[in-house]
Image (tube, grey):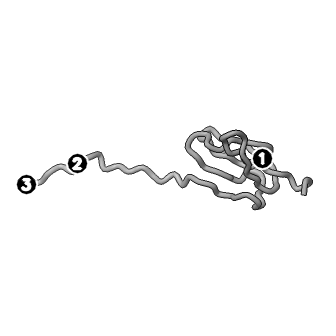
Amino acid sequence: MARKKQGNGRDSNPKYRGTKVFGGQRIKAGSIIVRQKGSKIITGKGVGMGKDFTLFSLRDGIVEFSKKGNKKVVNVLSRTRF
């Protein structure tokens, strides 16, 4: 006797979260720095946040990670500063 397959048979796609560009690396404006769930890492100078908490670069430069209290902060230092 045939039985109906249990469950709805659907599976969600992977989200590919994590750090895409690390400290000290060069980045172009508009490039993604971090994909995250919630604001675990917050924006600093030269960094914007998308509606899904994705951090992206607002200008060309070098990525820098630092701490502010108990949160991580990501900055993009413009090329004129180095």
Q: Secondary structure at mark 1?
A: loop
**Residue located farthest toward the bottom when viewing the structure as drawn:** 25
Q: Calculate the distance from the C-alpha at mark 2 to the C-alpha at mark 1.
A: 47 Å
Q: Amino acid at mark 2?
A: Gln
Front in this rendered view, residue 3 or 26:
26
Q: Secondary structure at mark 2?
A: loop
Q: Residues within 10 Å of mark 3 (few under 14, many from 20)?
A: few
Q: Amino acid at mark 3?
A: Met
- Mark 1 vs 3, N-terminal side: 3
- Mark 2 vs 3, N-terminal side: 3
In the picture, the disc for residue 1 is: 3
Q: Which residue is mark 1?
A: 58
Residue 51 horizontal/vertical position (percent): 62, 38
* Numbered marks: total: 3
- Mark 2 vs 1, N-terminal side: 2
Would you say 43 lies left or right of 35 here? right
The label nearer to you, 2 versus 3, is 2
**Residue located farthest toward the left when viewing the structure as drawn:** 1
Quadrant in which the C terminus is drawn: bottom right
Residue 25 horizontal/vertical position (percent): 75, 61
The label nearer to you, 1 versus 3, is 1
Would you say 10 lies left or right of 17 here? left
Residue 13 horizontal/vertical position (percent): 45, 52
Q: Within the image, what quadrant is residue 23 found in?
A: bottom right
Residue 63 horizontal/vertical position (percent): 76, 55
Tell me if residue 39 comes above or below residue 66 in the rendering: above
Q: Amino acid at mark 1?
A: Leu
Q: Which residue is mark 2?
A: 6
